[in-house]
Image (tube, rainbow, N blue to C red):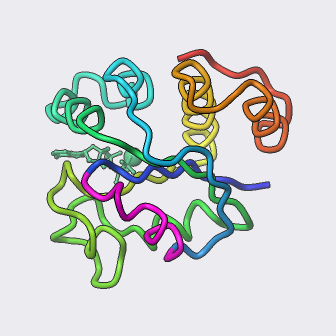
Amino acid sequence: MEYTYIVVKPNADERAERIIEELPCKVEKVALHVSLPREFWESFYVVHRGKSFYEELLDFMSSGNTSHFIGYGDGVIKKVRKAIGATDPSKAEPGTIRAKYGRSITENAIHASDSPSSAHFELSVGLTGLLQYGYIDLKRFMELKERFLGGEEVKHA
Ligand code: ATP
Ligand code: MG
């Protein structure tokens, strides 16, 4: 089943549950309003290591709480990317999540996977980190891993 890893970012976290209801997909709540350290975001966003905005992105993501969800269903990756809008909220189409709740290109309210391979990577790193920092228990970790990763080996953060 196609899935996407969704994170409501610190600038919008207080409104996470309302924001998630605006997405055009079924959603599994993984962890609400949790604080994860910089090291977690270093792994999660490793694809951006070395880019000009990387350090600022890590500072921001570890500056407050975030909420984690799995969106699922046919074509969910594309549908959710369209609903969240462009990376820069000032360029996002009116009505999109980032246009409504984003503050700046860094504080752009929400993350969603951009391909099946990033969804797989982000779900693996996400679940592992949430387990490691005590926000989900081993039973829930195994249940989500079985359901979405189909028993594949999970990469460690
Ligand atoms: P995300 O991966 O968070 O869903 P995205 O896929 O739209 O966002 P990416 O290019 O993957 O954008 O960048 C990851 C995140 O890094 C962005 O969401 C944004 O918070 C931050 N970012 C990207 N480009 C810039 C930039 N030029 N200046 C500052 N921050 C940036
Ligand atoms: Mg991205």
Coordinates of residue 48 in the picture (x, y in percent):
32, 31
Question: Residue 124 vs residue 84: left or right?
Answer: right
Q: Residue at x 15, y 70 (%)?
A: 90
Question: Residue 15 vs residue 80: left or right?
Answer: left
Is residue 139 positioned above or below 85 on the image? above
Question: Residue 49 vs residue 77: left or right?
Answer: left
Q: Main secondary structure of the magenta part?
A: helix
Task: Give the quadrant of residue 15.
Answer: bottom left
- Judging depth in this view, the residue of 124 and 144 nearest the camera is 144
Coordinates of residue 84 in the picture (x, y in percent):
40, 67
Does 15 lie within the magenta span? yes
Q: Residue at x 61, y 37 (%)?
A: 123
The span picked out in magenta is 11-22
Coordinates of residue 10 in the picture (x, y in percent):
29, 48
- Judging depth in this view, the residue of 8 and 133 nearest the camera is 133
- Judging depth in this view, the residue of 134 and 156 nearest the camera is 134
Does 97 lie within the magenta span? no
Coordinates of residue 157 in the picture (x, y in percent):
53, 17
